[in-house]
Image (tube, rainbow, N blue to C red):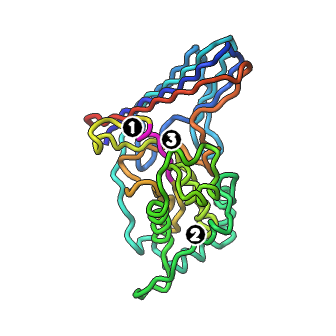
Amino acid sequence: MKLCITHTTQYSYMDPVMDSVNEIRLTPFTNEQQSCYQHSISVEPNAPLFSYDDYFGNRVHAFSVNDQHRKLVIRTQMTVVTKEAVKPIEGQEGMTPSQAWDWLATDGAINRFAEYLLPTEYTGITPEVAAFAETPQLSDSNEKEQGVYSWLAYVSNRIRNEFVYDPEATNVHTIAGDMMRRRRGVCQDFAHLMIAACRSKGVPARYVSGYHFVGDLRGGNADFEQASHAWVEAYVPGLGWCGFDPTNDALVGERYVKLGHGRDYKDIVPVKGVYRGTSEANLEVKVDVRRVEA
């Protein structure tokens, strides 16, 4: 699927501000699932961009606007071609469930994925989260254990079915434990809860930010509320990093465009910065995702 995406972030200030220093994480990955063919960034007031890759491999663009200004506008435009997801077949990992879980508990695996196993501010492992991560005993089955991929799919489905999507229930600072008590939230909250559950079971998991295209399913293009999205990647022995969306009942595939990943939301805030001047500011974000002919 070929997608054209535009993302505009605008800050309007009550009084002139200056010395604005910013970072942007709005560059799509190019990997086995998607290819970014075109990408552009423009800033008003005009400012030169400096780019680098952060610790997690995300492309970052940094810039400074030193002169006084009342408005800061960041526009990105990109064309990405995505591939359809292929659901792994049970047993495709090349090891038994017991072997996969045992491998995750080895010192080698723990050291390799340490940053994706430790709890963070957003993904604290409370007793409630640890209990949520436990699955009931499998009945009427010859399997003695549940595979890692099957367990991840179970947790993702459980979050989707047991929690209410409610944009008014939480905010950008809500942590997994709080959302779990409220039993409602948004994609960011659902992703943080799944990550916390994964880490409580010793499964490496990371937070993914990007876009989810549903425009043609709803009779139009995907606007900001539909398009900006967060989901989870968890490491399955024998398969590698696998995507799970605890918000939508869909495989993470051709309708998803990945921008970046990290331990939680804090690592991959799309636009963040500081400035000198008034604290009175208005933020407006517009995102549009369109499907175009290949």
Identify the element where label 2 is drawn: helix
In percent of the image, x 42 and y 29: which residue is there?
6
Residue type of the residue flagged with mark 1 = Val
Graded by Cα atoms within 10 Å as few (under 14), some (14 to 19) or many (20 or more), the crowding at tag 1 reads: many
Q: Position of residue 240 (x, y in %)?
A: 50, 61
- Check residue 259 in the rendering and tell me which mark sits there, or answer none: 3
Residue type of the residue flagged with mark 2 = Phe
Indicate whether 95 appears above or below 58: below
> Magenta stretch?
225-231
Indicate whether 215 appears above or below 273: below
Q: Name the residue under label 1.
A: 80
Of tags 3 and 2, the one toward the viewer is: 2
Q: Name the residue under label 2.
A: 132
In percent of the image, x 47 and y 57: which residue is there?
246
Residue type of the residue flagged with mark 3 = Leu
Among the 4 quarters of the image, the one containing residue 67 = top right
Question: From mark 3 to mark 2, how far is it between C-alphas?
Answer: 29 Å
Question: From mark 2 to mark 1, how far is it between C-alphas?
Answer: 36 Å
The answer to whether residue 179 is magenta is: no
Q: Where is residue 206 in the image (x, y as percent from the top left)?
A: 58, 54
Question: From mark 3 to mark 1, how far is it between C-alphas?
Answer: 11 Å
Identify the element where label 1 is drawn: strand
- Residue 192 makes an appearance in the image: yes
Graded by Cα atoms within 10 Å as few (under 14), some (14 to 19) or many (20 or more), the crowding at tag 3 reads: many
Query: Sequence order check: which comes first, mark 3 or mark 1?
Result: 1
- Check residue 49 in the rendering and tell me which mark sits there, or answer none: none
Depth check, front residue: 7 or 177: 177
- The answer to the question of whether label 3 and label 2 lie on touching residues, with beta carbons closer than 8 A, is no
- Left or right of 150 in this view: 2: left
